[in-house]
């Protein structure tokens, strides 16, 4: 059986970007042809493996969603490609608390007092080394659990009673509040309210809440989860390197979680997953 990590539902099936597929198929054909000049068996292997990756993952050339649709659009003929429907209906990933009215300055002061973040002489903030190690270990573990286990863990990290479930072939974790706000200081809300998190954000946020949970209260930990994504160095989904970049909306691409067609973000250099929007 093929490892599930090879499959990318966000880029295949109904979400497949046909311009991306065409460009990558052409690249595979050219590469296999060049290798075939040197060795026919080597060219054949490259052809089979390349097409298999395109079929399973949608593309093999890094950053294809950023350039393939524009490249195809400039061709002198109309290939008749339509953008596939967004599986998430245009939904954006939210914060773990579902609470958007947070005093950022007060939150940073609380995290600094607890030793979660530190500042250098210029005032730039850094994540404490011990927190970073615990956060990384937590993401490594959550990356390997089942979708149901991740949903349950994410619901447990919420600062209110909640249940968790997965949607969209595991691409989304949905946290549903099971009780109204009481005297526990949790964010305002009613039973049935939902928070939707991308799988990447669910892994990152759940792990960071666990990492800082012994230094701050549950509500502060949950509220800190979204801004602390700024300190991500490895991708919660694949473990790849995180870089500052600009994503552009593309049919079937993870960049499509944003309405803005061009958005500065932290994203994974390997799988293209957007992790933090500036």
Image (spheres, rainbow, N blue to C red):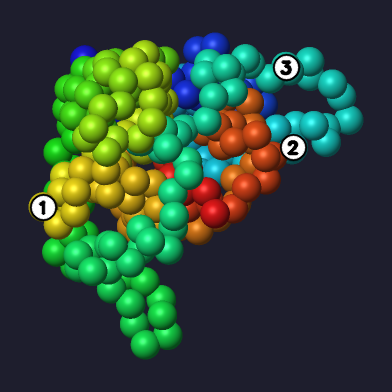
Q: Read off the residue under disc 3.
A: 82
| Residue 46 seen anywhere in this rendered image of the structure | no
Q: Read off the residue under disc 1.
A: 214
Judge whether 129 appears above or below 212 on screen: below
Q: How many marks?
A: 3
Q: Which mark is residue 70?
A: 2
State which tag comes first along the sequence, 2 or 1.
2
* Disc 2, SS: helix
Which x, y percent locates residue 224?
A: 33, 51
Q: Which image quarter: residue 57?
A: top left
Q: Which image quarter: residue 247?
A: top right
Q: Residues within 10 Å of mark 2 (few under 14, many from 20)?
A: few
Residue ID at (52%, 40%): 61
> Looking at this rendering, what residue extends furthest in the bottom direction?
121
State which tag comes first along the sequence, 1 or 3.
3
User: Of 272 and 35, which appears nearest the observer?
Assistant: 272
Residue ID at (87%, 24%): 77
* Disc 1, SS: loop
Judge whether 16 appears above or below 116 on screen: above
Residue ID at (52%, 48%): 277
Judge whether 241 appears above or below 172 on screen: below
- 209 vs 62, left or right, is left
- 245 vs 235, left or right, is right
């Amino acid at each position: 059986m093929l490892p599930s990590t090879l499959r990318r539902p966000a880029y295949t099936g109904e979400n497949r970007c046909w311009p991306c597929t065409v460009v990558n198929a052409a690249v595979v054909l050219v590469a296999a042809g060049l290798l075939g000049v040197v060795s026919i068996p080597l060219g054949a292997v490259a052809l089979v493996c390349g097409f298999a990756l395109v079929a399973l993952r949608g593309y093999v050339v890094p950053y294809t969603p950023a350039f393939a649709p524009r490249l195809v659009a400039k061709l002198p003929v109309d290939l008749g490609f339509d953008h596939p429907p967004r599986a998430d209906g245009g939904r954006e990933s939210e914060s773990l608390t579902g609470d958007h009215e947070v005093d950022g300055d007060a939150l940073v002061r609380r995290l600094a007092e607890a030793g979660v973040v530190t500042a250098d002489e210029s005032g730039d903030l850094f994540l404490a080394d011990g927190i970073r190690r615990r956060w990384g270990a937590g993401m490594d573990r959550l990356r390997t659990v089942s979708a149901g286990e991740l949903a349950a863990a994410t619901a447990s990290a919420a600062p209110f009673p909640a249940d968790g479930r997965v949607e969209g072939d595991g691409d989304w974790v949905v946290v549903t509040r099971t009780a109204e706000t009481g005297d526990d200081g949790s964010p305002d809300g009613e039973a049935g309210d939902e928070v939707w998190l991308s799988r990447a954000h669910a892994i990152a946020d759940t792990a960071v809440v666990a990492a800082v949970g012994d230094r701050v209260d549950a509500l502060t930990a949950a509220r800190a989860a979204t801004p602390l994504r700024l300190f991500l160095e490895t991708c919660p989904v694949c473990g790849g390197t995180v870089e500052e970049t600009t994503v552009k909306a593309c049919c079937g691409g993870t960049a499509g979680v944003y309405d803005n067609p061009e958005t500065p973000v932290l994203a994974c250099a390997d799988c293209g997953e957007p992790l933090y929007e500036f």
